[in-house]
Image (tube, grey):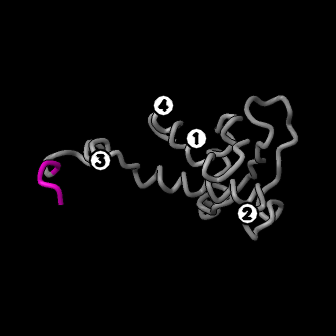
Amino acid sequence: MLPELRNLQYSECLNKLGLWTLDERRNRADLIELFKIFNGSSVVPVDTFFALSDDTRTRGHPKKLLKKCCNKDLRLHFFSERVVNHFNKLPCYTVEAKSINQFKSVLQKLRTTHGSL
């Protein structure tokens, strides 16, 4: 579509345009949906799909999710399974954002400082 980007690799085009990769966009959407579920902005109750980890010895934020063991490959791609690791890796100030817009802006800052989500 853009003649000046025609001969560039996919990652270079994304960098020049300031866009996220498809994987990053999916992770971001999952994290935003989970944030909405945690804060009551969604009709889905938290305990339907997620259980908070009661292990206090771990680093990170106090809202860590329990990672369930799954034996089937199919289950690994469910929303309730694929979002847990990404959510648990977030810094405390991200998870404790006051609003959805603040959460989104912190995710954007994390991406610009770390390179990806």
Residue visible at 52% across and 37% down? 109
Task: Give the residue pinned by disc 3.
Answer: 17
Q: Which residue is mark 2?
A: 41
Mark 3 and mark 1 lie on one chain; the one further toward the N terminus is 3
CA distance separating discs 3 and 2: 32 Å
Q: Amino acid at mark 2?
A: Ser
Q: Which of label 4 and label 1 is nearer to you?
A: 1
Q: Earlier in the sequence, mark 3 or mark 4?
A: 3
Query: Answer yes or no: do the residues labelled 3 and 2 have beta carbons within 8 Å?
Result: no
Report the magenta residues as a range. 1-5
- Lower sequence index among marks 1 and 2: 2
The residue at 73%/63% (across/down) is 41
Would you name the residue on which mark 4 appears?
113
Residue at left offset 56%, top offset 57%: 29
User: Looking at the magenta stretch, what is its main secondary structure?
Assistant: helix
- In the picture, the disc for residue 106 is 1
User: How far apart in space, not on screen, are marks 4 and 2 (Cα)?
Assistant: 28 Å
How many numbered circles are shown? 4
Residue type marked 3: Leu
The amino acid sitting under disc 4 is: Thr
Where is residue 64 shown, x and y percent of the image?
A: 76, 42
Q: Are marks 1 and 2 in contact (CB under 8 Å)?
A: no
Query: Does residue 29 show up magenta in the picture?
Result: no
